[in-house]
Amino acid sequence: MIGSHADWRSDLEASRDLTDQEKQNHVFLLAWYEHWRLGQGLEPVRASAVRFWNEQVITKPRKDWQLERWAVAMRWHRRWLELCAQNGREPRSLGERLHRAVMLAGAWRGFALRTRQTYAGWMARYGEWVAGAEEAMDTERGGAWLAELVDKGKVSFATQKQALNALAFFFRDVCRKEEVLFDVRLRRTERRTPVVMSAKEVVALLDKLELRHRLMAEMQYGGRAAAQELVSLRVQDVDRARGQVVVRGGKGDKDRVTVTLPKRVKESLDAIWGDLRAVHGKDRAEGVPGVALPTALARKMSKAGERWEWFWIFPADHLSRDPETGIERRHHMHAKVYGEAITRAARKAGVEKRVTSHVLRHCFATHLLEGGTDIRTLQELLGHADVKTTEI
């Protein structure tokens, strides 16, 4: 290990006590552990390794030889951490340290979790690109990284702007630089035509979905919500009598009311209400902590998450650890789970297009436009700040 930063991969490769096969085995397990640890926002310490072993390794049937091989790898990593501590070496990569710094700064600024994760993800990539911490705080090197992303990355204009915003946030709010300028010109890219299904294809897709996912798809199509907005709906957001849903904190951090939902969707909502009540009652009886609340409300009303009106419309079927607080509670269904269900249903329905959950928003907009709805009304319904976005 040279310098103040240690890298487990380099040290593993340089080890003279292991065979090439043992090194390969260690890399497999430790890369798995590192990926899981970073996703959970945990430090590289013994406690996180124990939790990884209990939650990821032994939760599924494994062969004895696998467990023994992986246990040897974890013991090597634990010894490596001890050596890092003894020699004053930093076991976390620069990318990980930048990721953590941006997450903390974003939380202090009150940014939404997804925004913080996006910015932190870009800074993790930047941290792996620069040679060291001192170089990472040089705005000229930041500009060079951004220029390389624009010139060689071939990413979209929107992605370029996202990386620029993340980099500017890092220098302003983490490095505390008053003036941040990058001598980089972003490159505009051609807009891609969104994928749109016909009404017949939408019906075919819906028929291949199980009840809960079908209700979500119908609400997304009829209520023009984005997937993340949909999965995070709460009981109080749904007015079953009027057939309307309030999407809170949507685009531009604005609330908006959906169009009136069809009778079929209202009936489906009525059908799941009893099951939701049962899940909520079970959690209360078992003393499960209440659902997560927006940060400000969580401080003001610490017990509000236990109340019925704050419960999720689409709760997950199991408890999981809150990445923000470490509390084990019931979260809403993950948007990725819903998105994968949509993609599978499209394949089963024989839809020969690249279908994601967001395509349902495109379909809603296009079908309304074809039916005579004017573009300004459509802009308001979709929650777009700029009509140009709607025009696409």
Image (cartoon, rainbow, N blue to C red):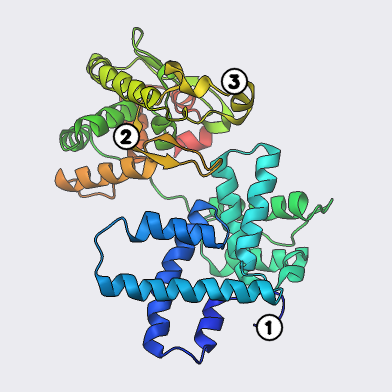
At 68% from the left edge and 83% from the top edge, which residue is drawn?
Answer: 2
Q: Are marks 3 and 1 in contact (CB under 8 Å)?
A: no
168, 106: nearer the viewer: 106
Q: Is residue 230 above or below residue 167?
A: above
Q: Is residue 224 above or below residue 139?
A: above
The residue that disc 2 covers is: 363
The residue that disc 3 covers is: 301
56, 367: nearer the viewer: 56
Q: Are marks 2 and 1 in contact (CB under 8 Å)?
A: no
Kind of residue at disc 2: Cys
The residue that disc 1 covers is: 2
Mark 2–mark 1 distance (CA, rounded to whole Å) = 56 Å
Q: Is residue 183 above or below residue 259?
A: below
> Upstream in the sequence, badge 3 or badge 1?
1
Q: Position of residue 99 (x, y in %)?
A: 62, 57
At 22% from the left edge and 35% from the top edge, which residue is drawn?
Answer: 202
Kind of residue at disc 1: Ile
Farthest right residue? 178
20, 365: nearer the viewer: 20
Q: Position of residue 387 (x, y in %)?
A: 52, 32
Q: Secondary structure at mark 2?
A: helix
Which of discs 2 and 1 lies nearer the camera? The answer is 1
Neighbour tally class for label 2: few under 14, some 14-19, many 20 plus, Cα within 10 Å: many
